Image (tube, rainbow, N blue to C red):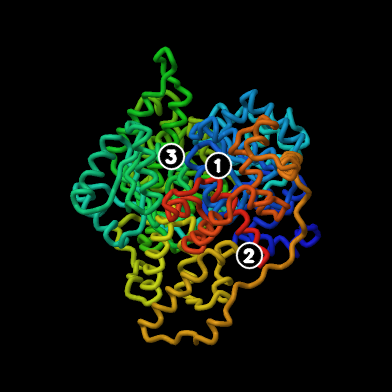
């Protein structure tokens, strides 16, 4: 599809992908979605966590004229995404309550000057009338390339994280009917998808629904017993310092578990709604930057976590429903690397959840009976998942309407299969009883009839007179319940999902009743340890990987960014396996784009050569290294003409006006003038640098740039012992960057 598209400045979408983000190939579905986006179609994109949703709107935004507005629900989420984009030298910014008035105005000036491609904003700000007026200016002066609604399940009241303010986003479609809308989310049942299409008024959208299967994740459920803390502690120790999240139901349990882990020498921090905003933010930042290994949290810690290298997620209590569990466990392994999802299950948690459901009341203290009923059905589905003996993926994917054959090889039930028995006769009895009860009752009532119960519900309906009454008294209620769950998971019977869980027959049910199909079910037994776990620390590849992680951590700390912004774990593993020693080899690593090749290529290849030398492995010769230079970028199309605001600043500068005079004449901030001049210098426009910064100051600043690099102003300012202001440094750096681009 993309082959027919014209991509200004690039041979193909793949070339643009490599240039901006360093990836050689698209993930499944990405290319078709991007091609549709470049044709200005509305889109609904359902991709699991780690599937590459963000790229689906980020890359098209860079290739289209104008600004793409990204609706993001949390400050932390938008800040993380913008930081990662800036690390790839991509013009992105955000506007939210964390910014002061001056900084917000400066960012608005940059947007209006045409120097921003992606603007992240929360729905509350986006729908403010004053901000909408600003967007009108953006559309008129720069252009609106599109609207991307991230975490779009928040639109639907049937989603797991409904937010009323998301409902109002349809107002933007009415205000800007010609601006294409892209809705993206990781989890959405068929009902939620329909609600998203309706609420956002998507017109003839290109709909992409990826598989919800996360093959890199291993799922396991363990009984929660008195010694479960020892099991938890051992699980963490076996991870050898990798990042992990532990979810608990209550703040009290979060605090107690955090203290216990800290006492046992585990680097852990708490996160819950009872902490001050400042403390929560600080703890989250420590976790993201790998300053602590473990985050112990309630579900308050969630959607805004953009950390790709979480290696394990542990639920120390039963989650509320399967969708929440899928979402929370899915925060492991977003980079596609093998990761573990462990759930501890106790009936005590059921009582706690039941109490929480009872707290669903309206403003007058009256029970919200419909919400409570739906919540209890979802809780029971979660209990079924925890107690199930069939493939965990079959249950998870079935919840989202996706068929799975079972035997995933990546869950405890598949790796440690229980004894399988033929229960075809029992299944026929069960399904026959569902039919005799006119498909109007739930599992408990069917079991009561099969076992010959004399309770009032059975007798009052005359079900003691059915032919199936009492034919199953040779099995316990738990055995019949296990069969019923297995039939549901295998798709041999259906259950309604409106809060009244009624069993219904389907076409597959009749294949069993007509003796056209046998029914096998697994019988529970004591689980064994996952045999696939191996200690990769002993391998040479893993040793180099840990060494590169340490280097990444040091570089990240120096730049005050999260480690994954430097490189993701998957890129480090490629480096560890392929061990590139030259820049030309390093460029071929997935995740290495032009900016990161320039920024990190030399230091990482030196580290790899040093490791190989210590191990007695061959290293490249000095002659090869002398010839090793940065590959030259292909010629790109010229940038568009200057925006009106930049052109006006340039004209006043060329008339001899000082920055102060320009600011006064144009009624804009002085800082904005310096931003304009810096952008003009970086574009190679005729700005007289010596009239702005004396030559001796230029020389000192250039020497500092050569010493500490040009990526961040702070290190340059510190290296110069604050002798020169940020404005002067910014101007000289812009001139240097232009020269660097041309060299």
Tag of residue 321: 3
For this view, does 178 lie left or right of residue 505?
A: right
Q: Nearer the viewer, residue 309 or 167?
A: 309
- State the quadrant of the C terminus: bottom right
In the image shown, does 423 or 670 lie closer to the viewer?
670
Label 3 element class:
loop
* Residue that mark 2 sits on: 25
Mark nearest the camera among 2 and 1 is 2
Between 521 and 321, which is closer to the camera in this rendering?
Answer: 321
User: Closer to the N terminus: mark 3 or mark 1?
Assistant: 3
On the image, the x and y values in percent for residue 407 come to: 47, 62
The mark that comes first in sequence, 2 or 1, is: 2
Label 2–label 1 contact, CB within 8 A: no
Q: Which residue is painted at 76% across and 36% down in the image?
A: 141
Q: Secondary structure beneath disc 2?
A: loop
Q: Quadrant of the N terminus?
A: bottom right
Which of label 3 and label 2 is nearer to you?
2
Q: Which mark is residue 472?
A: none
Q: CA distance from mark 3 to mark 1?
A: 24 Å
At mark 1, the secondary structure is loop
Badge nearest the viewer, 3 or 1: 3
Crowd around label 1: few <14 · some 14–19 · many ≥20 (10 Å): some
Q: Is residue 340 above or below residue 83?
A: below
Residue 514 seen from this side? no
- Residue position marked by numbered label 1 in the rendering: 505
- In the depicted structure, whether residue 173 falls above or below residue 225: above
Q: Do the CB atoms of the residues marked 3 and 1 lie less than 8 Å apart?
A: no
Q: Quadrant of residue 667?
A: top right
Whole-percent x and y of residue 135?
A: 69, 32
Mark 3 and mark 2: span between their CA atoms?
A: 35 Å
Q: Residue at x 71, y 68 (%)?
A: 634
Asked which quadrant contains residue 614, the reply is bottom left
């Amino acid at each position: 599809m993309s082959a027919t598209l014209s991509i200004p400045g690039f041979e193909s979408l793949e070339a643009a992908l490599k240039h901006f983000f360093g990836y050689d190939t698209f993930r499944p579905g990405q290319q078709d979605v991007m091609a549709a986006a470049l044709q200005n179609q509305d889109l609904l994109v359902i991709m699991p966590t780690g599937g590459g949703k963000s790229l689906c709107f980020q890359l098209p935004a860079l290739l289209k004229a104008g600004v793409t507005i990204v609706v993001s629900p949390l400050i932390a989420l938008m800040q993380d995404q913008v930081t990662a984009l800036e690390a790839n030298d991509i013009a992105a910014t955000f506007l939210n309550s964390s910014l002061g008035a001056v900084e917000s105005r400066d960012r608005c000036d940059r947007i209006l000057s045409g120097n921003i491609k992606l603007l992240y904003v929360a729905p509350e700000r986006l729908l403010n009338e004053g901000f909408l007026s600003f967007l009108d200016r953006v559309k008129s002066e720069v252009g609106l390339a599109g609207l991307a609604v991230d975490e779009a399940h928040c639109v639907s009241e049937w989603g797991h994280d409904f937010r009323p303010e998301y409902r109002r986003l349809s107002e933007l479609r009415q205000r800007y009917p010609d601006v294409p809308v892209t809705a993206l989310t990781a989890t959405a049942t068929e009902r939620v998808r329909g609600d998203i299409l309706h609420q956002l008024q998507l017109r003839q959208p290109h709909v992409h629904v990826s598989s919800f299967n996360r093959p890199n994740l291993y799922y396991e459920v363990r009984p929660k017993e008195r010694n479960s803390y020892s099991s938890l502690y051992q699980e963490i120790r076996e991870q050898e310092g990798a990042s992990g999240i532990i979810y608990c139901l209550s703040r009290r349990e979060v605090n107690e578990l955090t203290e216990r882990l800290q006492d046992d020498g585990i680097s852990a921090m708490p996160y819950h709604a009872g902490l001050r905003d400042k403390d929560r933010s600080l703890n989250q930042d420590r976790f993201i930057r790998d300053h602590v290994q473990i985050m112990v949290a309630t579900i308050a810690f969630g959607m805004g976590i953009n950390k790709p290298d979480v290696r394990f997620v542990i639920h120390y209590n039963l989650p509320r429903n399967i969708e929440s569990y899928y979402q929370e466990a899915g925060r492991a392994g977003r980079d596609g690397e093998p990761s573990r999802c462990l759930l501890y299950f106790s009936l005590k948690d059921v009582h706690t959840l039941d109490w929480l459901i009872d707290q669903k009341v309206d403003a007058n203290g009256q029970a919200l009976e419909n919400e409570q009923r739906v919540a209890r059905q979802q809780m029971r589905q979660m209990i079924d998942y925890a107690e199930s003996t069939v493939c965990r993926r079959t249950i998870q994917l079935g919840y989202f309407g996706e068929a799975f054959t079972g035997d995933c090889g990546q869950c405890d039930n598949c790796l440690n299969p229980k004894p399988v028995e033929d229960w075809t006769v029992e299944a026929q009895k069960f399904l026959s009883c569902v039919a005799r009860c006119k498909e109007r009752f739930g599992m408990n009532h069917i079991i009561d009839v099969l076992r010959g119960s004399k309770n009032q519900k059975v007798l009052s309906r005359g079900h003691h007179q059915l032919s199936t009454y009492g034919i199953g008294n040779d099995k316990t209620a738990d055995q019949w319940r296990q069969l019923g769950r297995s039939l549901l998971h295998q798709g041999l019977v259906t259950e309604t999902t409106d809060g009244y869980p009624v069993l219904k027959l389907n076409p597959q049910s009749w294949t069993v009743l007509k003796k056209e199909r046998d029914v096998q079910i697994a019988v529970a037994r004591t689980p064994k340890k996952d045999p696939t776990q191996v200690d990769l620390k002993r391998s040479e590849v893993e040793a180099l990987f840990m060494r590169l992680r340490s280097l990444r951590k040091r570089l990240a700390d120096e730049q005050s960014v999260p480690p994954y912004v430097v490189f993701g774990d998957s890129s480090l593993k490629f480096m560890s396996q392929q061990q590139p020693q030259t820049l030309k080899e390093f460029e071929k690593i997935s995740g290495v784009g032009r900016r990161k090749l320039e920024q990190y290529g030399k230091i990482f290849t030196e580290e790899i050569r040093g490791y190989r030398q210590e191990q007695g492995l061959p290293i490249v010769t000095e002659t090869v290294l002398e010839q090793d230079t940065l590959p030259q970028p292909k010629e790109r199309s010229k940038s568009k003409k200057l925006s009106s605001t930049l052109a006006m600043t340039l004209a006043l500068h060329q008339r001899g006006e000082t920055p102060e005079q320009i600011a006064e004449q144009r009624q804009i901030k002085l800082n904005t003038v310096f931003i304009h001049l810096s952008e003009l210098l970086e574009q190679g426009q005729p700005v007289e640098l010596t009239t702005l910064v004396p030559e001796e100051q230029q020389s000192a600043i250039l020497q500092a740039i050569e010493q500490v690099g040009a990526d961040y102003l702070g290190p340059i300012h510190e290296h110069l012992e604050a002798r020169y202001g940020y404005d002067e440094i910014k101007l000289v750096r812009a001139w240097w960057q232009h020269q660097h681009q041309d060299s």
